[in-house]
Image: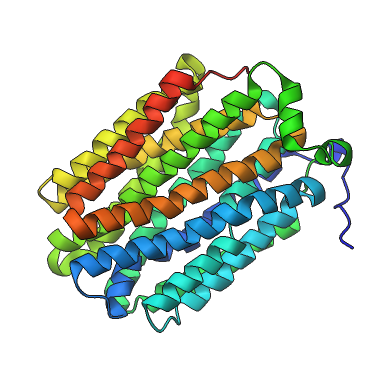
Amino acid sequence: MIQPAPIPPASSVSWQRNLAVLWFAEFTAIFGFSFAFPFLPLYLRDLGVHTPNELALWAGLSGGASGFALAVSSPLWGAIADRYGRKSMLIRAMIGGGVTVLVMGFARGKVDVVVLRFIQGLTSGTVAAATALVATGTPRHKVGWALGILSSSIATAGAVGPALGGIVSAYTHNLRLLFIGGGLLLLVSTLPVLLLVREPPYERRAAAASPALAVLRQAGSGTLAAIVVLLVAQGFLQMSFSAFQPLVALRILAHAGNDVNTITGITFGAIGLASAVAAVVYSGAAKRFGYLQVAITTAVLMGLAEVACGVVPSPITIVFAGAVAGFAYGALQPAVSSMIGLESPAVVQARIFGLAASATALGFGVGPVLGGAAAAETGLTVGLVIAAVLAAVVAILLAVRGREPAR
């Protein structure tokens, strides 16, 4: 029978050290993902999917498969994390992601890619696991800043990974190497977590045995309603951005000619770099104007940028509009995560973040399928407009039903 992980003395755990190690580990893990996955539509083309409509459809299916599986598995992993510890769940997610991405480099066709993406969703989820670990071990008044720092690692890796992936694919003309290399990087990312992260103490069994719903109701002051609103917003946020990403790659494919690999890498590099900058600087704006106001404003900005990507006429303007969307997402995502962390009682945080990961994953599953199907039937511009409408839903939901959490 699995036993709960031992709890180290509070004085022996440094949240700053954990944050630094997790920053590096998540950078390595997300670098592994982003080194390969922006090129998934191009990889599908190499595997025999050639017509634009069919390519849009299969890119959406492969993107959605992982999200649907992650939506199912995330609450389970969150409950296990509350019972047995967050660190072990992060290691599990990195290993699961690493193995599936590595094997994807040996896919024989489009069906293999979709199946492996589904398995990846069942076994991975590094961001949710790392977020729960940071939120639990960070002093309350530092949670927003710490999650912004963690998000900056994700966004920075999202900038560097596609840029280097584009260079490697342009030089080698072999997209399989990107998936093999990305999988190996994910496996390497487990080492600093395994060796250096020390999980902080937190109340385990008595509270963790209670249903999360009961704990939230006992918290009072509208906590349950506030978290429900944030979880729904999290789902629509990811639905918008995950619909946007493959459609941008396809839009570049339609306009970039022979330089498509390089320009795809540059575009996703710009998106990631802008996200990294926003993840670091957003906390200053949140302190001045509040998390809620930052989230509403950036949701509107993201929607406008997504529309622009669908109508601008050249690769250069697509890169710029994509960077603006990335900047907005880079502030919006940690702002919503910070509000979830500040609203959630510590004893059920991993379960709440598991539900947040499930909402994110559901959006990640529905978004590419919805955008890909719309693009396949009516064109890329309509698909990108749909992504923008989903971002507008986030802004409206937070403006009408959201609240600023106590700090």
User: x and y percent of residue 174 in the render?
Assistant: 33, 79
Q: Which residue lies most toward the left here? A: 313
The quadrant where residue 215 appears: top right
- Please indicate whether residue 245 sits to the left or right of residue 183 in the image: left
The color scheme shown is rainbow
Q: Quadrant of the C terminus?
A: top right
Residue 343 visible to the viewer: yes
- Residue 29 in percent (x, y) is at 54, 59
Residue 14 relative to residue 188: left or right: right
- On-image quarter of the N terminus: bottom right
Q: Residue at x 54, y 60 (%)?
A: 69
Q: Residue at x 55, y 68 (%)?
A: 119
Residue 188: percent from the left, percent from the top?
A: 60, 66
Q: Nearer the viewer, residue 222 or 322?
A: 222
Say left or right for 314 vs 359.
Answer: left
**Which residue corresponds to the image point at 59% horizontal and 60% vertical from the top-left?**
124
The residue under the point 75% across, 52% down is 80
All told, the count of numbered labels is 0
Q: Quadrant of residue 388?
A: top left
Rendered view: 228 above or below 195: above
Q: Is residue 327 above or below residue 123?
A: above
Q: Position of residue 321 (x, y in %)?
A: 23, 42
Q: Residue 360, relative to residue 28: is it above or below?
A: above
For residue 283, above or below residue 58? above
Answer whether residue 261 is visible to the viewer in this image: no
